[in-house]
Image (cartoon, rainbow, N blue to C red):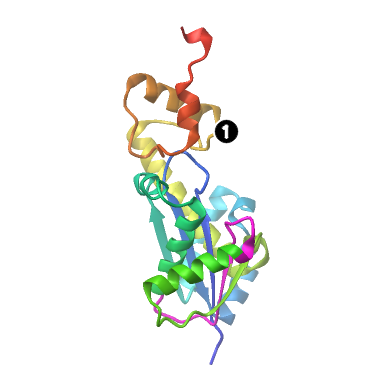
Amino acid sequence: MEELRGGIDEAGRGPVIGPLVIGCVVLDAHGREELRRLRVRDSKKVAKSRRKSLEPRIKDISVEYRIAKVEPNEIDWLRKRESLNLIEAKKTAELILSLKNSPHRIIVDAADSVAENYKTKIINAINSINNDFRIPELISEHKADDNYIEVSAASILAKVERDREIELLKEDIGDFGSGYPGDALTQEFIRECIRSGSLPNCVRRSWNTLDKSRQRPLGEF
């Protein structure tokens, strides 16, 4: 029986604006070779235009793929009682359980500072949902998106999907930059929203970026 391998990675973990997107790709040996031939790499090392062109190819070549989105309001609600690492681990568990195929091995890019702890969180989450599920070999590593073609492919699907969501948001509410807390344009957008008294639903209210933006500099008084 041909060995299937799955890869899982996320995009949008750190931004204050927009969803967290998690991608999952299942590949057979032929698919892994095809994606190597296409020089699929971690999405952070691939130009935006190339990511967009690779996305449909990855979907076509994959035995199966899945995308999960966690919207800002859900992130804020869940973070009242659990860490972002645990939220991501639980969503990863749901992705694994949703697969129609049964990969022999699934590799995840570790969100936890201790990679093995992240693996444990995922296993516990799977067992809490379906204790009878036969969990495949699970590998949790840092830089897995660099080291495994399956995870690189999942990284690209997640990143392109998040970019698509961000473009739709900008059409609706205007340009807010990258959505990352360190982006000056994003910071100004947040400050303006706070001044106007209206924060869009796409803003993660549990991020400390909002608290910092509420601290008005002396020059504004």
**Crowdedness of circle 1 by 10 Å Cα count: few (<14), some, many (20+)?**
few
Along the horizontal axis of the image, is 184 left or right of 221?
right
Q: Nearer the viewer, residue 44 or 86?
A: 86
Q: Nearer the viewer, residue 106 or 89?
A: 89
At x 68%, y 65%, the residue is 147
Residue at the extreme front of the image, as rendered: 81
Estimate the x, y position of residue 216 in percent, counting from the top left: 48, 16
Estimate the x, y position of residue 218 in percent, counting from the top left: 52, 9
Whether residue 159 is visible here, answered yes or no, is no
Estimate the x, y position of residue 56 in percent, counting from the top left: 46, 63
Q: Nearer the viewer, residue 197 or 83?
A: 83
State the predominant SS element of the stretch in magenta. loop
At x 37%, y 42%, the residue is 168
Q: Is residue 103 magenta?
A: yes
Q: Quadrant of residue 32?
A: bottom right
Residue at the extreme bottom of the image, as rendered: 1
155 over 127 or under it: above or below: above
148 over 186 or under it: above or below: below
Q: Which residues are magenta?
A: 99-116
> Mark 1: which secondary structure?
loop
Along the horizontal axis of the image, is 98 left or right of 8?
left
Give the total number of marks visible in the rendering.
Answer: 1
User: What residue sits right under mark 1 in the picture?
Assistant: 182
Q: Quadrant of residue 155?
A: bottom right
Along the horizontal axis of the image, is 167 left or right of 37?
left
Instruction: Identify which amino acid the numbered label 1 is placed on.
Output: Gly
